[in-house]
Image (tube, rainbow, N blue to C red):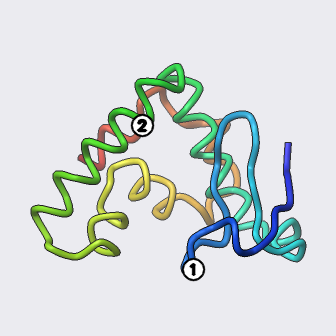
Amino acid sequence: MILLVQPKLLRKNFNGITLWPFVILKHNSLKNDAIFINHERIHLRQQAELLLVLFYVWYGIEFLFRWFQYKNRLKAYRNISFEREAYFHEQHFDYIKRRKPFGFLKFL
């Protein structure tokens, strides 16, 4: 389910966020951005297979690890395994259908 929020509610550099079962968008035009929506659908699958809580705990711990590793928030974010999987496959529109469970592990 896609929700639209006031742009001020999301961080400056973020156009959207996935909080299962919702994809929250900063701008209505993003609903028509197939690549962006596919990226967020990959996150929905990741969250579902890790039963939400484990996803958020893992995401947070890996972000902190990457932040210490790179000393840069953006680089840390882009190197989280969940993000690497989603960015790598965001243009592969059939990826969700053929994705194996825990596909993000290949990106650790």
- Residue nearer the viewer, 86 or 70: 70
Question: Secondary structure beneath disc 1?
Answer: loop
55 vs 108, left or right, is: right
Q: Which residue is mark 1?
A: 12
33 vs 32, left or right, is: left
Q: Which residue is mark 2?
A: 103
Label 1 neighbour load within 10 Å: few <14, some 14-19, many 20+: few
Tell which residue pokes out farthest to the top in this image. Answer: 51
Label 2 neighbour load within 10 Å: few <14, some 14-19, many 20+: some
Say if 66 sits above or below 58 in the image: below
What residue appears at the point 28 percent right and 53 percent down from the top-left corner?
63
x, y percentage for residue 25? 77, 63
Residue type beneath disc 1: Lys
Q: Single out the mark in the foreground, 1 or 2.
A: 1
How many labels were placed on the picture? Answer: 2
Image quadrant where residue 80 sits: bottom left
Image quadrant where residue 79 sits: bottom left
- Residue nearer the viewer, 1 or 34: 1
- Residue nearer the viewer, 101 or 39: 39
What residue appears at the point 22 percent right and 76 percent down from the top-left corner?
72
Residue type beneath disc 2: Gly
What residue appears at the point 69 percent right and 65 percent down from the top-left corner?
9
